[in-house]
Amino acid sequence: MAGKVFFSVSMSLDGYVAPEPVTTVDDIFAAENRDDPEVRRWMGQWTELQQWILPLRFFRENLKFGPGGEEGVADDIARATFERTGASVMGRRMFDLGERSWPEEAPFHTPVFVVTHHGRDPWERPGGTTFHFVTDGIEAALARAREAAGDRDVRIAGGGTTILRYVNAGLVDEFTVAVSPVLFGAGTRLFDGVDASRVALEPIRSEPSSRATHLTYAVHRR
């Protein structure tokens, strides 16, 4: 039996899943821009948004940062999210950011299907992650991810635009947002452009942790 399609993201208290972008991915990672105020602002806000997950024991284990780290509710949630995921789907912008910042052993350890307009040979990384580049739409990417995941779940990893496309297409079964106590004021809103006339939400659970509140909803068609 096929698993669920879900997403799990961090969100600021005012509804943003990413800071207001600098011009390009290259701007963020170019050595000459490390002291640029806009790049430093973007990196600082992103770190604040993810402050609930960075100290976790599971996060340190998964990225091979060594022993230690915090345990508790947030660590259990992060670990369960990883364990339920049999394959992931993401947009090209998220991949471009991650290609620059993920370690050699990328943190997914499953097949990842990248929705893109530009084809590319599969990119295999140590530890079980292989990126596949899908040029024929979100449905095709999801179909391939479902096949790869088997009876485990498929995670729509991001970014926000890709998640919204799947929500509006009625292809998401469930989601969790970790609401961080930060305010961005501008950026990428999680539900900016959602077709609310087609989407109904059912609260599943609310779990507070020391740095975020984790809200889980089932998604139904109206």
Image (spheres, rainbow, N blue to C red):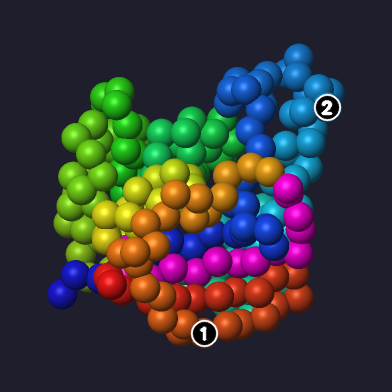
Q: At which x and y percent is residue 134?
A: 25, 36
Residue 205: mark in rendering: 1
Q: Amino acid at mark 2?
A: Pro
Say which residue label 2 marks.
Answer: 37
Left or right, 3 with respect to 93, comes to left
Q: Amino acid at mark 1?
A: Arg
Up the image or down, 56 lies above or below 141; here it is below
Q: Quadrant of the N terminus?
A: bottom left
The correct choice, above or below, for 9 with respect to 38 in the image is below
**At 27% across and 60% down in the image, what residue appears?**
171
Q: Position of residue 201 (x, y in %)?
A: 41, 75
Q: Quick check: can you spot residue 72?
A: no
Extreme-top residue of the structure: 32
Q: Residue at x 44, y 49 (%)?
A: 193
How packed mark 2 is, by other alpha carbons closer than 10 Å (few <14, some 14-19, many 20 or more), is few
Q: Residue at x 75, y 70 (%)?
A: 211
Span highlighted in magenta in the image: 172-185
**Element type where label 2 sits in the image:** helix
Q: Earlier in the sequence, mark 1 or mark 2?
A: 2
From the viewer's side, name the closer residue of 145 and 109: 145
Examine the structure image and report whether residue 212 is included in the region drawn in magenta.
no
Where disc 1 sits, the SS reads strand
In the picture, which quadrant includes the C terminus?
Answer: bottom left
Of residue 39 and residue 185, the one placed in the foreground of this image is 185
